Amino acid sequence: MTETVQLEAIRPCLEGVVPSVLATVALDGTPNITLVSQVHFVDARHVALSFQFFNKTRENILTNPYAKVQVIDPDSSAHYRLSLRYLRTEAEGPLFEKMKAMLAGIASHTGMSKVFRLLGSDVYEVLSIEGAQSKPLPCALPQHNRLSALRATLSQLGQCTDLNSVFNALLEALQHHFGINHAMLLMYDRCGERLYTVASHGYVVSGIGAEIPLGTGIIGVAAQERTPIRIMYMTGQYSYNIAVRNSMQQSNPRLELETEIPFAGLEHPHSQIAVPITANRQLIGVIYADSSKNLRFTYEDEDALMALADYLALCIAQHHELSDIRPEQSVDIVADDSDNGPPSVIKHYAANDSVFIDEEYLIKGVAGAILWKLLHDFTTQQRTEFSNRALRLDRSIGLPEVGDNLETRLILLQKRLLERCDFLHIVKTGRGRFQLQVDRAMSLQEA
């Protein structure tokens, strides 16, 4: 390319805030001018335009692949003209899903939800960029320096000694350094093809244990496609109020029991961002944040959170490995099963390993199987000390062969017990070891 302006330097123009003007030419030389909803940044040499209608523009570009598009900086009002060459159309995959989500927000914001529907993402090579003659307006200084915020956050995470403190430090750092007041961390459950919430911050309910099916909403799509997704306006298409519902009846219709933990996100988010946590393209989890403000998350937030997610993946892998190392010493904590009232009835449903305490739902899945194993060993053997290594070797729990996330499941279980049960506690006694504290008599029932 021989452009005088670098594409990365004008990324604010490619956020879809101001519609862009696209010019194409038919084979007979007849020009056509139209508005386009999105000019999406792909990389330093390519952009993608939203393909929504089969019209004259589409007809022209398929016969004559050259076009020009004018984009506008929403802050400074500076104009730029991009000379483009059409390469291909993508109708599925990460790029398509990112543009689809962003277009849904733009459509809802402009009242065009029933009209705007993405048919494909047209990928163009950028041949040149030139600045149009215009007097730009002064831009406001950014509220947060993302590079400084990222540096401070990584330093904070590097001082954590266990995975639970990593999760807590992450959410605290997002608020303190990035100004993100509502966020959560979800981990991937390979067994159930879904994500479960292990930490949250800033919401009325914690949502610990809430599940998101892969491919559902912005979180599920970001996870499925392994790509960050950012929405700048409120959109019903990516709401979790109904989509997230996936109760036990779906896996076993005969059971009339509610096992859905409420999702912690804002009821009406105007901005959302979901960033996948991956290692070698293997999904580990998702960092999610939302806001009641429009245009809250920029491409700079996306870049910083992607770098943070990569570092977090390394932290998680490191702490999972260390959790299997037997410590030289452990702390003795004596369980107390004294009679503090009538026995609590704890029921286990093998259909999905859900556990209920006194008819109140607690947990299901692998975390439920782990809890049932701990309770069974306690009642039959009076056992209170456990290790991560021993749990991994126990086939009855049903941990996957690869990427079992045992440590995060224990954190999830520990937090759910802290929220929902006042007589069962999981207490760490050393690296890779913990104890079960029982402060009330129990009656275990296999349903």
Image: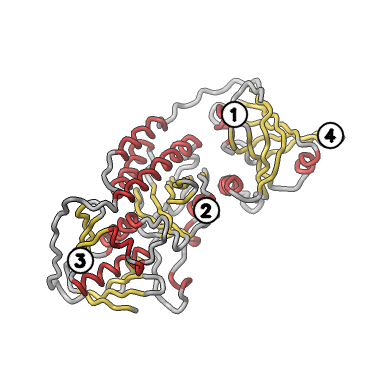
CB contact under 8 Å: marks 2 and 4: no
**Residue at mark 3:** 423
Dividing the picture into quadrants, the one containing residue 353 is bottom left
Dividing the picture into quadrants, the one containing residue 333 is bottom left
Q: Is residue 205 visible?
A: no
**Residue at mark 4:** 30
The answer to whether residue 267 is above or below residue 294 is: below
Where does the image place residue 94, in percent across and percent down from the top left?
Answer: 57, 47
Dot 3 crowding, Cα within 10 Å, few <14, some 14–19, many 20+: some
Q: Which-is-in-front pick, marks 3 and 4? A: 3
Mark 1–mark 3 Cα distance, whole angstroms, equals 59 Å
Left or right of residue 372: residue 253: right
Left or right of residue 172: residue 82: right
Q: What element carries label 2?
A: helix
Q: Is mark 3 on a helix, strand or loop?
A: loop
The residue lying toward the viewer, choosing from 135 and 400, is: 400
Amino acid under disc 4: Thr
Amino acid under disc 1: Leu
Q: Is mark 1 on a helix, strand or loop?
A: helix
